[in-house]
Structure formats: C-alpha cells, structure tokens
Image (spheres, grey):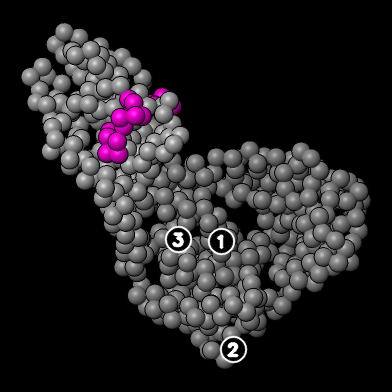
C-alpha cells in the first residue's frame, strides 16, 4: 500500500481512502505531490518484495506507451485504490502486469487506467533520503520480469506440495472426531468443551466439514455456550456466514407445513409429519438448529395416489413424466417430489416407507410405525408425528452410511428421552436387521455413546466400521468420496465375497466409475492404516 510520505511541515493525508479488505497481491497508494512537483507514493504491502519494501517512496513520471518497456513498474487505478506492479507484457490494447512476489498472478490493465511510471525510488520520505533507482536496481527488476514464469512454476509447485503434505494422514486435523466431540458437548450442554483450531485454513476446513455434515447451526450453538478457545470466534463467524439464510427459510417452511396439515385434515387423509416438518409444526425450541430443505410426510401406501392428486389440485406440480413417476416409486421410498406453488419454499415428499426398497429388512412403513406416533399441536390443530422411539429409528435409518452426523444428535436425544425398555426394544429391532446390520448397528452404537446411555455390547464388525468411517471422513475428499468398495467391505463384515452391489454402485452404475472405485481400494485402506485405523 502506498501512502503520503510524512514531512515536518505537513502531515495531512490526502488521496484515495484505503479499502477495508485489501488483497495481499496489491499495493494501495495515495497520490501526493513531492518536492520535485512529481507525484510521490509511500510503499506499503508485500507484493513487490524484495525490490520494493514498506517505507520506500516511489516518484512517478508520466506514462507513455511509446517509451514503455517490459520490466517498468507502473501505477494503475482500480476501484477505490491504486496498485504498483511490474509490466510483463505490452499488448495492443492493454498492459499485463504482475507483482514481483506473486508471479503467478497477472492483471490486465487498460492504458487509461495507468496514471504513471515509477521513475525514481527513494529509501524513505525524509529530505536526505538515498536514491535507489540506479542502473543495477532496474537491472535486477528486469531479471524478476524475465524469470517470472519460472518463479511462478516454483510457486505452483510449492502450493501443490503444501496441499499434498496437508493431505497426509498424520498432517490432517481429525475433523470427524472434532465435530463428534462438539456434538457430544451440545447433547450434554458441556460448558467446559473447547475446540482447538490450528490456523485460518483449519477454521475454513472445519466449517466446511460441519456444513457437509448438516451441523453448521449445531456447531455454532455449541461454541456459544462452550469455553472459548484459540480461533473459536473466527470459527463461529465462518459458521455464521454459511448459515445466514437458514432462519428465514425455516420460518417460511413452517408456514408451508401448516398449509399442508390443513389440506390433509380437510380431506381426511391420514398422515404423519416426519423430521423437520414435525419440529417446525410443533415449533420446538431447537427447530432452527436442524434446518430442513423439504417437507416430509408419511402416508399409508393405499392413500398415496389420493394424497398426490390432492396437492396437484392445490397448486403443487410434478416435473416428472408419468413413466418417470412410476420408476420413482419403484426405486424410492417416496413419490416423485411435488414442487410448491409460488411463494412457498420447499418441495413436498410423500413417503410410504422410511428407506428405499431393498435397503434394509427392517419394516418402516405405516403399519410398522403407527404404534410409535404421538399427537403434536400446531397452528392448524393436532397432527401426528413419530414419538421418541419412531423418531430415533427414522434418523438411525437415515444416517446409515454416515452422510449426515446431524442425525446422530437426534438419535442421541431420542435415546436419552426413551425408557430403558424402549431402548432394549430398539436394540432388539436393530439386532434383527438382516440386510445391512453392521452399518445400522454402528449408527445406534455411536448415538448411544454420544447420549451417554447404556447399550448392548457392540458388534466387533460395527466397531471396525465406525473406525473406518472416522478414517474415511478424515481423508481427502478425492479418496473418501470414491471409497464405496471399502465401505461395502466393512458393511459385509470384511468379506470380499459378500459385497453389497448397492453400496459399490451408489451414485453411479457406470462401469468405468465402478472400476475406478475398485482401483482405489488400496489407496483407501492404506490411508486408513496411516491414520491408525483397521
């Protein structure tokens, strides 16, 4: 940044006001008249290191394209600031410039934006300052210009090397364990909890991981009552930025849920509000900590067509063809989404079960769950929602695969609210699962740990799977998101001859993609081993 050189006679600052958020790649300047009548600029910033340093004073001469040469340092105007960088190319309609210290960054500068060329460099703003811009000074500057591409290549190499080093198992922060500790602290309202963050990059990565796990609001709430720690304020600010619009949207969805309840009631169609829809309708105190993006409702299979037609008549629309709608019902646990009329924010999903066909053997349709419902009150009168047992089961089913740790919090809260007999019943139900017992058991085992409640002795395969999940979530995403084959191996009790093709082929059944997942098996297992996981 360039400011006015101070002098005993006049210390008043004039020129452009500095902008609050400055890039390290730029020097912001303030134009002032020097003793010679030429504009003088006091250097600040680091993007022209090492030739130009803070405290030096630049004296400008008029810019002329006819005499401009590559290697000259020019000052040009950007919105609300002036920048001093070196010319690296002269194009017919503009200049290309770069800071000496950031050779990988180039700026395109039109001629009309240039306000002068640096003609002299003084060591400081004092009257007896040394003049530095001799032949050797300019020669070294041209060396920086001619070696820019080579230095830029080294800069990129350093950048990627740092990324690789940060991706090594021992160098990466334990994001999964860190977030799990925060969620446990939330469940128990542990005011002694603190989260240790190493630097600004760690702040951003931790916030992004919390967002992917649906825990942005929960993490913020934990930081609000927990003991302050290094960078905790920065982490709270980063989380606040991600969740800024959530509150407004949740209020709008709550109004929409009331209208949905009214429509069901007026037409006598039985229904159960699920997850966020139930929380919003009952206006629970923690409703904004579990933001929803759609309205989920469970209906008897025999009433699905009637409910679907009802909302089409009331302004909802389905963007799928008849054939696609039929295929949707065969492959999903709810009908094709119904998109609301203008003014309402969330799609409506009419469920007939809580899991897609063939995913689990545990029954989760209307007949299996109706005995685990309760009545809640809302703006349109009473409505049915799942009780603690049913809600815990729903979120456990939803969390199989651990794509959203937020569901673990709901399961933990449900386990704490249930009686010992109900927890035993839920444990027995999970033990009877025959299609995917390892992953369902692992979800409930982790939820019981977070809740701090007694739970039957854990299945060793479920414990091994939990350790794998921690390793998977701490890996670079380029490996972790392509580790479905290893996921299937753990789910199959670590037997290669029993892999579930649904897991291996999840997200895509293209042969090349599936083959790539098999090829990444050694990388996934090696990375997990490097993290101390089996």
* Eye-nearest disc, 2 or 3: 2
Magenta segment, which residues?
Answer: 63-81
Q: Is residue 148 left or right of residue 307?
A: left
| CA distance separating discs 1 and 2 | 26 Å
Q: Position of residue 149 (x, y in %)?
A: 31, 52
| CA distance separating discs 1 and 3 | 11 Å
Residue lying furthest bottom in this view?
497
Location of the C terminus by quadrant is bottom left
**Residue at mark 2:** 498
Residue lying furthest front in this view?
66
Q: In this view, does 162 lie to the left or right of 369?
A: left
Q: Is residue 25 left or right of residue 43?
A: right
Asked if the stretch drawn in magenta spans residue 65, the answer is yes
**Of the numbered discs in the image, which one, if any, rests on residue 168?**
none
Name the foreground residue: 163 vs 397.
163
Of the residues under marks 1 and 3, which one precedes in the sequence?
Answer: 3
Name the foreground residue: 250 vs 374.
250
Question: Which of the 4 image quarters holds residue 319?
Answer: bottom right
| Residue found at x 43% / y 25% | 112
**Residue at mark 1:** 404
Helix, strand or loop for disc 1: loop
* Eye-nearest disc, 1 or 3: 1
Helix, strand or loop for disc 3: helix
| CA distance separating discs 2 and 3 | 30 Å
Helix, strand or loop for disc 2: helix
Residue 292 sits above or below residue 324 on the image: above
Q: Where is residue 301 in the image (x, y as percent from the top left)?
A: 85, 67
| Residue found at x 30% / y 30% | 67
**Residue at mark 3:** 180
Q: Position of residue 298 (x, y in %)?
A: 78, 60
């Amino acid at each position: 940044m360039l400011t006015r050189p101070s002098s005993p006679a006049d210390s008043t600052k004039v020129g452009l006001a500095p902008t609050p958020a400055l890039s390290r790649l730029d020097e912001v300047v303030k134009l002032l008249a020097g003793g010679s009548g030429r504009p003088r600029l006091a250097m600040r910033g680091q993007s022209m290191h090492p030739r130009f340093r803070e405290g030096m004073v630049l004296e400008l001469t008029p810019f002329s394209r006819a005499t401009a040469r590559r290697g000259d340092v020019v000052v040009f105007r950007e919105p609300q600031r002036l920048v001093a960088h070196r010319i690296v190319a002269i194009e017919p309609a503009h200049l290309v410039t770069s800071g000496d210290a950031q050779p990988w960054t180039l700026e395109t500068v039109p001629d009309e934006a240039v306000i002068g060329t640096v003609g002299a460099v003084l060591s400081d703003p004092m009257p007896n300052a040394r003049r530095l811009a001799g032949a050797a000074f300019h020669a070294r500057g041209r060396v920086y210009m001619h070696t820019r591409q080579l230095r830029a290549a080294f800069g990129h190499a350093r950048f990627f090397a740092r990324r690789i080093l940060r991706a090594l198992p021992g160098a990466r922060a334990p994001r999964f364990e860190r977030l799990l500790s925060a969620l446990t602290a939330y469940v128990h309202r542990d005011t002694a909890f603190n989260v240790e963050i190493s630097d600004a990059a760690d702040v951003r990565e931790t916030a992004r991981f919390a967002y992917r796990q649906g825990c942005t609001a929960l993490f913020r709430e934990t930081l609000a009552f927990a003991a302050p720690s290094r960078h905790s304020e920065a982490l709270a600010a980063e989380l606040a930025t991600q969740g800024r619009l959530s509150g407004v949207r949740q209020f709008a969805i709550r109004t929409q849920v009331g209208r949905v309840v009214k429509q069901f009631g007026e037409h006598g169609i039985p229904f159960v509000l699920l997850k966020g829809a139930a929380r919003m309708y009952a206006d629970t105190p923690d409703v904004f900590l579990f933001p929803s993006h759609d309205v989920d409702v469970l209906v008897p299979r025999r009433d699905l067509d009637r409910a679907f037609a009802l909302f089409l008549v009331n302004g909802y629309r389905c963007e799928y063809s008849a054939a696609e709608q039929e295929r949707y019902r065969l492959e999903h646990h709810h009908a094709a989404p119904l998109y609301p009329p203008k003014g309402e924010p969330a799609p409506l999903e009419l469920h007939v079960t809580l899991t897609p066909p063939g995913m689990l053997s545990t029954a989760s349709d209307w007949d299996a769950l109706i005995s685990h419902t309760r009545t809640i009150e809302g703006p349109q009168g009473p409505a049915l929602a799942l009780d603690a047992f049913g809600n815990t089961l729903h979120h456990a089913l939803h969390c199989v695969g651990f794509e959203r740790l937020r569901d673990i919090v709901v399961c933990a809260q449900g386990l704490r609210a249930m009686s010992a007999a109900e927890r035993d019943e839920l444990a027995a139900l999970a033990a009877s699962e025959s299609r995917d017992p390892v992953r369902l058991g692992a979800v409930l085992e982790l939820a019981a740990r977070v809740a701090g409640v007694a739970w039957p002795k854990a299945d060793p395969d479920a414990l091994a799977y939990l350790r794998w999940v921690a390793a998977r979530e701490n890996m670079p995403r380029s490996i972790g998101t392509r580790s479905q084959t290893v996921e299937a191996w753990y789910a199959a009790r670590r037997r290669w001859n029993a892999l579930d093709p649904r897991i291996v082929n999840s997200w895509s059944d293209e042969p090349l993609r599936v083959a790539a997942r098999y090829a990444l098996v050694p990388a996934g297992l090696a990375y997990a081993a490097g993290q101390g996981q089996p």
